Amino acid sequence: MSDTSARDQARDTAMPVGGISSDRIEPDENAWTRRLVIFLRIMAVVSIAKGLYHWAQVTGFVGGEEEAFENQSMAWQTATIYFAVIELVAAVGLWLATPWGAVVWLTAVVSMAVIELMFPGIYGGSLTVVAFEAVMLAAYLALAWMAARERPP
């Protein structure tokens, strides 16, 4: 009978299973890294859309007869082909969250801002595009900084 009473006493003093469950909130050690990856995936989708839009301009799926690829200036054609390729390459790298993907994406973002600001004759010099690119660049840098702080060297 002592064996049963010892078992009952151990059961009465044991921690309930509810204390082991997920009721307690554990600090997330990789929250910023996860947010960075989500941001990169969102930017990958945006890059795919931008790249496909540029390819649609090249192939003639968007725009009228007067806006056809052949009727544009050589500078416009060159920039459009450049962005049609680099945006899709950046999208693949961003989706995979690779370092080269971020570098290619940063190259595309800075290139678009430079073309809009310094060569307004090519795409029209839209400050809205430049502001969007600047906000996305700042968001990436902030998220990358916070993610790097999570992983000490």
Image (cartoon, rainbow, N blue to C red):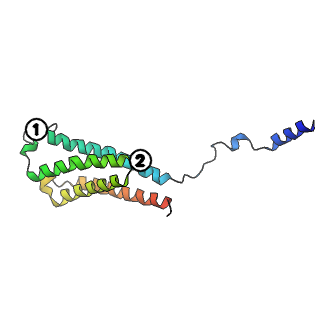
Q: Could you tell whether 133 is left or right of 126 in the image?
A: right
Q: As displayed, is residue 8 above or below residue 87?
A: above
- Give the CA distance from mark 2 to mark 1: 37 Å
- Residue sitting at x 89%, y 38%: 3
Residue 56 occupies quadrant:
top left
Give the image location of residue 116, x and y in percent: 19, 56
Q: Which quarter of the figure has residue 12?
A: top right
Crowding at mark 2 (Cα within 10 Å: few <14, some 14-19, many 20+)? some
Which disc number belongs to residue 31? none
Please tell me how crowded label 1 is: few (under 14), some (14-19), or many (20+) other residues with Cα within 10 Å. few
Choose between 105 and 146: the one closer to the eye.
105
x, y percent for residue 72:
8, 47
Is residue 152 positioned above or below 57 on the image? below
In the rendered structure, find residue 38 and report the number of the disc placed on it. Answer: 2
Give the residue number, with chain letter if any, for mark 1: 64
Q: Position of residue 1 (x, y in %)?
A: 93, 35
Q: Residue at x 42, y 52 (%)?
A: 36
Q: Secondary structure at mark 1?
A: loop
Amino acid at dot 2: Ile
Describe residue 5's horizontal placement relative to residue 20 as left or right.
Answer: right
User: What residue is shown at x 78% (from left), y 43% (from top)?
Assistant: 14
Picture residue at 26% right of the left edge, 58% below the top: 110
Q: Percent position (x, y) of residue 104?
A: 29, 54
- Camera-nearest label, 2 or 1: 2
Q: What SS does tag 2 mark?
A: helix
Q: Amino acid at mark 1?
A: Gly
